[in-house]
Image (cartoon, helix red, strand yellow):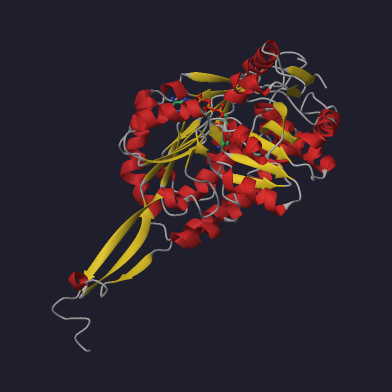
Amino acid sequence: MNHKASLELRSPLFEDIVEREGEVGVFKTFVAGSWVLTDSLAVVKSPIDGSIIAKVSRLDAGAIEKGVDVVYRLGRRRIRDIPGEKRLNILSRIADLLEKNAGDFEEVLIVNAGKTRKQAAGEVEASIDRLRKAALDLRKLQGEYVPGDWDRHTLESEGIVRREPYGVVLAIIPFNYPLFDTVNKFVYSTIPGNAFIVKPPSADPLPVIMFARLAIEAGFPPESLMVATLKGSEAERLVADRRISVISLTGSSETGVKVMQSAGIKQLIMELGGGDPAIVLADADLKSAASKIATGITSYAGQRCDAIKLVLVEEPVYSEMKKLLVEELSKVKVGDPRSESTTMGPLIDKEAVDAMVEAIEEAVSKGAKLLYGGERIGDTYITPALVEVEDKSILKELKLYKDEVFAPVALITSFSTLDEAVELANGRRYGLDAAIFGESMARIRKLIRFLEVGAIYINEYPRHGIGYYPFGGRKDSGIGREGIGYSIEYVTALKTIVYNYRGRGIWEYL
Ligand code: NAP
């Protein structure tokens, strides 16, 4: 397949938010009640072949200020004044609209994010599912009753601790799950009644803008929503804005540090960099482990926070595991994601492939061995790679170990004791997830106890899915949890109300 990448949306829903400029559509953005077309346009390219597929209206500082003002003054109240049941109905209508327009969303994820059709369909389906599971978040919106009679100073009073929305949540979205991540943050922010400002990723902002169109169509209060199309490097003022109470960022650890420095005192959810270790024990089903680890390395070209980046194999099965893993990696079909036979598409841009090539070269120059792959095929395509480290004294020096190289590449090495495996896994600065393959429960339990991560997958590669099981990191991987029900804690404030019956006396009848 080699025809030029271009974007064609079929649904009439998107007609009024896209103006035509020759072959390329110019997207408006949504600012607290109106769709706006600006003079400053950002070019959006396809990772498939670098073609320009759209332009997007970018907001300047003045437009952002006006938008935040409306969201804060009006939007914050509008969403909160809608009864919970009706908010839930709006989310359900968005799910229906997403299902109806799934084809357009799949198309945009293929052309703008470079996903294969299966991956694009998976992201759309996960987004619909997340919207439909919003009712499960409600269960965490409940508060507590605190009796006063256990303290002599509060004998005549009692307290209620309730959760209420903070006001305005700013969601900052990464390029790898532009639709799902927007939907997930939107659901847990708005279900308790927060207004929502979303900053889309510059590489693939289109799914975010299209989602806003559905939300408005479904009856979401327009003043309570804004799509802040601006560059991350210019977002400092927005991040620092005191009218925003919560920031939910999914992005790299480096961006996390910058956002924390600018944010000031705010509630934060930081879903940051990762790249996970997979530990293979001697009693593991090696064939199954190899197949799952290969998927963990290559799914969406390794551009996942929960991608496997370090494979640690117990010595007796090391050679066999290495062989099986190379066999599995060699089955991956790299190519144009529009082709049905492709299982791994392009990386998001040329720089991502450059970074992978450079990291492999650095590892080899320090004594590691390229066991498989790493073959560049054009600007944005590369075969998945496995890099072996025999001399463990160099492991911690390698960029592939120290940093998150956001590409389909993993290191492989052996270990002789569980303590060594734990030490090598915990030695990275990240602590998002880990995978363990094996049978002995006693040994698995020891690993579970000592791994410094947010989630552990046994006999499975790490995959966060829709957050039915909560996920989130430790160390440089972040703060807080994303997961159905679990994120409510971060977007709501506790308020304690104390009722004093002194005088009338709740204990008087005794
Ligand atoms: P990124 O470069 O950190 O960008 C993420 C978002 O932050 C983008 O919208 C970006 O805007 C914005 N941004 C950049 N600098 C900013 C700043 N100074 N202030 C405010 N916003 C700023 O990450 P990415 O390459 O898009 O995504 C991949 C990263 O996300 C990986 O590290 C991956 O592990 C992580 N991730 C983590 C999870 C998790 O659950 N822990 C899930 C998915 C992804 P621009 O696009 O305009 O630069």
Please name whichever residue, 91 or 378, is drawn nearer the observer in this view of the structure: 378
Image vertical order of residue 61 relative to residue 316, above or below: above
Task: Point out residue 230 in the picture as x, y percentages from the top left corner.
Answer: 46, 25
Please name whichever residue, 371 or 230, is drawn nearer the observer in this view of the structure: 371
Task: Point out residue 162 in the picture as x, y percentages from the top left corner.
Answer: 35, 61
Image vertical order of residue 207 relative to residue 99, above or below: above
Task: Point out residue 157 in the picture as x, y percentages from the top left corner.
Answer: 22, 72
Q: Residue furthest left?
A: 503
Q: Give the position of the N terminus as an image quadrant.
A: top right
Q: Please identify the quarter of the rendering in which residue 123 is found.
A: top right
Please name whichever residue, 45 or 130, is drawn nearer the observer in this view of the structure: 130
Q: Give the position of the C terminus as an image quadrant.
A: bottom left
Q: Residue furthest bottom?
A: 510
Can residue 373 be seen in this snapshot? no
Q: Residue shown at 66%/39% (left/top)?
A: 11
In the rendered structure, the answer to whether residue 335 lies left or right of residue 406 reads: right
Image vertical order of residue 410 relative to residue 370, above or below: below
Q: Residue shown at 55%/45% (left/top)?
A: 184
Q: Residue shown at 70%/43% (left/top)?
A: 436
Task: Point out residue 203 in the picture as x, y percentages from the top left corner.
Answer: 58, 24
Can residue 157 be seen in this snapshot? yes
Q: Residue shown at 80%/45% (left/top)?
A: 283
In this rendering, the count of numbered labels is 0
Q: Residue furthest top?
A: 365
